[in-house]
Amino acid sequence: MTTEEKPKHPIIAMDAVESSQIAAIGHHAESNTLAIQFPSKTDKPGSVYHYANFTADDFKAFQDAESKGSHFGKHIKKNTEKHPYTRIS
């Protein structure tokens, strides 16, 4: 890869969720990528991260979780070997 090339990330539509820890989530089925936008601490949009190896079933369980923040902490954040992440913005 030359210095001019940047890694390409899928564009993932995200939907707002009711959570104090997570602002929005989305899933790209073709690449099994989860997108999470965290709440902003300023007047700018919050950071967006992509998590790899996230199946449609994993996403459904995340969507259906009573607490998105708790589900994230238990099943995604602590599982970086299964779901390595990249900060997108």
Image (spheres, rainbow, N blue to C red):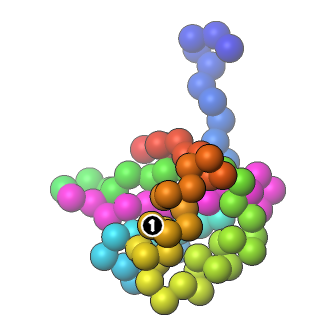
Say left or right for 47 vs 42.
right
What amino acid is labelled 1 in the image?
Answer: Gly
Q: Where is residue 72 in the image (x, y as percent from the top left)?
A: 48, 68
Question: Dividing the picture into quarters, in which one does residue 18 lie?
Answer: bottom left
Q: Which residue is rendered at x = 50% and y = 57% of the image?
A: 78
Q: Where is residue 37 in the image (x, y as percent from the top left)?
A: 43, 60
Q: Which of 61 and 42 is in front in this view?
A: 61
Vertical placement of 46 versus 71: above or below? above
Residue beneath label 1, please?
A: 73
- Read off the magenta span: 28-41
Residue 38 seen by the camera: yes
Q: Is mark 1 on a helix, strand or loop?
A: helix
Residue 28 seen by the camera: no
Question: Dividing the picture into quarters, in which one does residue 8 lie?
Answer: top right
Q: Position of residue 45 (x, y in %)?
A: 32, 56
Vertical placement of 32 versus 65: above or below? above
Say left or right for 46 vs 88.
left
* Quarter occupied by the C terminus: top left
